[in-house]
Image (spheres, rainbow, N blue to C red):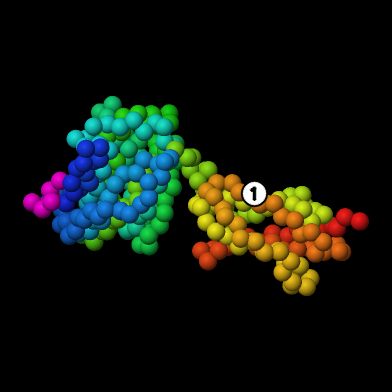
Amino acid sequence: MYVNNQLQDEVFLSDGAWSIDFNPANTVLNKFETKNDNRKSVPEELQLFRNVSVSANTTAYFAMLKLMRGGGLPKDISAYQSMKFNAFGNGTLKITLVKQSVKNWDDQYFLKIPLSNNPKDYLIDLGEFSSLVNKNRIKADDINSIVFTVTNSAGITSSITQSINNLAFSKESANYIRSLSSKEIKLFPNPSTGKFNCVFQSDKDVQLQLTITDASKGIVLYRKTVGAVKGSNTVSVDLGTSLQNLSVCILNLGSEDGSYQPNRILIQPAK
């Protein structure tokens, strides 16, 4: 794909190019750049390759378009429930999922999100996309492209930047993916005689350190390395005979990347 007679993106057999749309009468394109990403393949994701960055001076808008397949052929993504990407820029971003069967542009399904100047991860359930004429959930069985539009609402020429990175569709629902980022620890039974389960969610495979401390004495009673997997995790804990009296203990779980919210458990040793 060429912009101003310069090659900007290449199309592969199963992949679509990035391109840009703007009116030269009111927009000066300063940069349009695509770069390969270094993501690992994820079975439950449909990854749309290469990242894109655009900078322009405009009184109106510019739009970045990602074809789903080479030649602009439609793709059935109805098996996927959410869209995820990292983005930064200024203004409001309008995302349009272009259905091949919808002929009137104003009838397409779209969503608007505010942008931040700092890179931010976005997670959108496909059910959040809406149409002005069709009130049903989008039937994403013939998506030929995704259009990212940034509009200048200032009324004067302004510099607008936009970057889209790590764009993908996921078979997991947005609510489920968000739940994996929860830093809550559940302990049961609580109270316990010293044997209990620690349940938590993880958004990736990671090594964590679990420690249990006597709340009144500050003494570490238990320490364990936990190999967490993406999803729900359950760790069995047995404090043995380390506590002889009724005690409140604090459980901490974390790694160098961050920690979970500590939780308390009441230990009532068996008589």
Q: Residue at x 31, y 44 (%)?
A: 48
Residue 266 seen in this snapshot: no
Q: Residue at x 77, y 53 (%)?
A: 195
Residue 240 seen in this snapshot: yes
Farthest left residue?
5
Q: Residue at x 35, y 55 (%)?
A: 87
Write the start and end of the magenta stretch as one range. 1-7
Residue closest to the eye, 109 or 226: 226
In x, y percent, where is residue 10?
18, 46
As drawn, is 154 to the left or to the right of 229? left
Residue closest to the eye, 206 or 19: 206
Q: Residue at x 65, y 54 (%)?
A: 185
As drawn, is 186 to the left or to the right of 141? right
In x, y percent, where is residue 164?
31, 52
Quarter of the figure with the C terminus: bottom right
Residue closest to the eye, 179 or 233: 233
Q: Secondary structure at mark 1?
A: strand
Task: Determine crowd level at label 1: few under 14, some 14-19, many 20+ residues with C-alpha closer than 10 A.
Answer: some
Residue 3 magenta: yes
Vertical comparison of 3 with 131: above or below: below
In x, y percent, where is residue 52?
26, 53
